[in-house]
Image: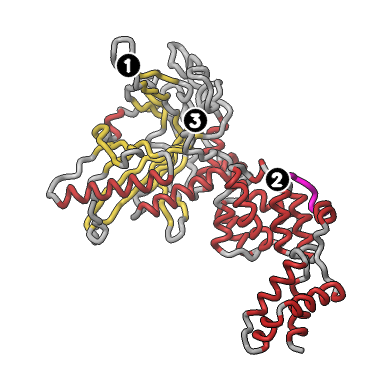
């Protein structure tokens, strides 16, 4: 496809469905744990059996209010639930309980690197079930579908953005920022692979400089950050080609296929009137007091942007701070190090360097490793006191990650403490200079870079244990004689 970005501009809005981390469903008592056997997490309420009534899970409301406050939204004093009518095999009742004109969160914004992305609303609703399509021939020689209703009734918070994003990169950053916020406040685990966070993308294009929006298409089935970027780029080019050929862009819902890398038409795009919304008769409107909101506000954990600012004030660069903040388990571990007096910059260097590389290779988290906070602090203290060198500390942290052995005990066991007395280092330097007369002559003749050669030889001789500052001082004195 051609690149039309010099001529056209993307206009992107996102609808993110976040599964709330409650123990039970939004209107029923059964659990909503991922990975259970099909149709084992169901009840008469979830299945929409005659005579049953939904009961609102208060914890879902608490989490929605907390999210709204984190997203700078307004929490109204009243919200209500509505029936959204549509018929699908995995929707047992034939309607979904959602919120329409009076949602629990109104307005707000999310900060990305270069701008604020507006939030239109966030509303509570129940999820539908899941269809499993079998590719093999069935009893009558045709394919078939199975219905798993475990997800039906799972609590969702749908967060709808304004159409403020102008590139696939901005869309990706927005979803990453939103995911971080939800994870840090503890309302959603943000696991895209398990479906606990899903994004539907609305995209239209317009000639650069034009104020009016074009006709939008909604993209479904986007389950990774990479897929979101690829889907938006494909759809941008598809719509641009239509306009270039003098054709119209049709308002529709399209399905993203990650294997083929294309979108395909799924159905004509519905509008609100197609769903025939009306107030849910089995649930009273919800009154939310200022005291309720204030109580939840006082329980707000530190948000990612606040953590970023704190790390930068502690001496980290914006990049280093963002790397840590974007890995919540690493950031929480880092906070424990700081609380025990570890140097901010040294600790972050080790976490982002040797520790991160080891964790990636072993495919484990920092909490799953054998490097306890207390033992790591011991190691950093040994480095700070000059008992061990930086290189020795780097090798030891890997060994501790693997074995969990005590840092002090390892130093003593392996004899790795730094050599810091002149009487031990000076003979080694003299021995090296005597063994390399040609290099000494060249150095004195102006080849200053050979200084590093002598340092390397001395470090090799002492197995990296020589005090670097003392070694450099004594070496220079000997060479200058």
Element type at marker 3? strand
Residue 323 picture location, percent across and down:
56, 55
**Where in the figure is residue 120, as x and y percent of width and height?**
39, 46
Between 182 and 404, which is closer to the camera in this rendering? Answer: 404
Q: Earlier in the sequence, mark 1 or mark 3?
A: 1
| Magenta highlight on residue 405 | yes
Residue tagged 1: 137
Question: Where does residue 235 sit, x and y in percent of width and height?
Answer: 28, 46
Numbered circle sitting on residue 155: 3
Give the crowd class for mark 3: few <14, some 14-19, many >=20 residues within 10 Å: many
In percent of the image, x 54 and y 61: which residue is there? 319
213 or 373: nearer the eye?
373
* 417, above or below 175, in the image: below
Q: Which residue is drawn at 53% across and 22% down?
A: 36
SS at circle 2: helix
Give the residues in magenta.
403-408
Could you tell me which quadrant the C terminus lies in? bottom right
According to the picture, the residue beneath numbered tag 2 turns out to be 402
Is 189 situated above or below 241? above
- Left or right relative to 425: residue 58: left
- Residue 46, compared with residue 412, is above or below; it is above
Alpha-carbon distance for marks 2 and 1? 49 Å
Task: Choose the circle earlier in sequence order: 2 or 1.
Answer: 1
Picture quarter containing residue 261? top left
């Amino acid at each position: 496809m051609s690149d039309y970005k010099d001529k056209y501009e993307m206009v992107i809005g996102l609808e993110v469905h976040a599964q709330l981390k409650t123990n039970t469903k939004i209107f029923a008592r059964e659990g909503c744990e991922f990975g259970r056997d099909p149709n084992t997490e169901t009840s008469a309420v979830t299945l929409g059996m005659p005579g049953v009534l939904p009961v609102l899970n208060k914890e879902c409301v608490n989490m929605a209010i907390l999210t709204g406050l984190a997203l700078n939204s307004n929490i109204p004093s009243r919200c209500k639930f509505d029936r959204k009518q549509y018929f699908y095999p995995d929707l047992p009742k034939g309607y979904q309980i959602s919120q329409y004109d009076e949602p629990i969160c109104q307005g707000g914004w999310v900060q990305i690197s270069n701008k604020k992305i507006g939030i239109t609303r966030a509303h509570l609703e129940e999820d539908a079930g899941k269809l499993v399509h079998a590719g093999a021939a069935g009893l009558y020689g045709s394919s078939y579908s199975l219905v798993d209703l475990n997800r039906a009734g799972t609590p969702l918070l749908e967060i709808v953005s304004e159409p403020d994003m102008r590139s696939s990169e901005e869309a990706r950053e927005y979803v990453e920022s939103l995911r971080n916020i939800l994870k840090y406040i503890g309302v959603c685990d943000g696991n895209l692979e398990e479906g606990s966070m899903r994004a539907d993308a609305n995209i239209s294009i317009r000639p650069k400089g034009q104020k009016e929006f074009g006709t939008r298409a909604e993209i479904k089935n986007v389950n990774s950050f990479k897929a979101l970027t690829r889907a938006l780029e494909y759809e941008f080019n598809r719509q641009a080609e239509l306009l270039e050929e003098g054709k119209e862009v049709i308002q529709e819902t399209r399905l993203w296929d990650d294997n083929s890398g294309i979108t395909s038409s799924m159905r004509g795009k519905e509008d609100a009137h197609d769903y025939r919304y009306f107030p849910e008769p089995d649930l009273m409107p919800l009154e939310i007091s200022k005291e309720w909101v204030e109580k939840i506000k006082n329980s707000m954990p530190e948000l990612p942007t606040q953590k970023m600012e704190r790390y930068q004030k502690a001496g980290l660069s914006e990049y280093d701070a963002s790397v840590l903040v974007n890995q919540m388990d690493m950031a929480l571990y880092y906070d424990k190090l700081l609380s025990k007096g570890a140097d901010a910059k040294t600790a972050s260097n080790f976490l982002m360097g040797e520790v991160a590389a080891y964790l990636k290779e072993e495919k484990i988290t920092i909490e799953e490793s054998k490097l306890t906070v207390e033992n790591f602090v011991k190691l950093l203290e040994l480095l700070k006191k000059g008992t061990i060198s930086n290189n020795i500390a780097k090798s030891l942290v890997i060994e501790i990650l693997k074995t969990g052995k005590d840092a002090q005990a390892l130093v003593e066991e392996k004899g790795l403490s730094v050599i810091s007395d002149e009487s031990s280092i000076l003979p080694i330097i003299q021995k090296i200079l005597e063994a390399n007369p040609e290099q000494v002559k060249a150095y004195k003749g102006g080849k200053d870079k050979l200084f590093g050669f002598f340092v390397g030889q001395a470090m090799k001789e002492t197995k990296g244990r020589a005090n670097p500052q003392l070694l450099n001082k004594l070496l220079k004195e000997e060479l200058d004689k």
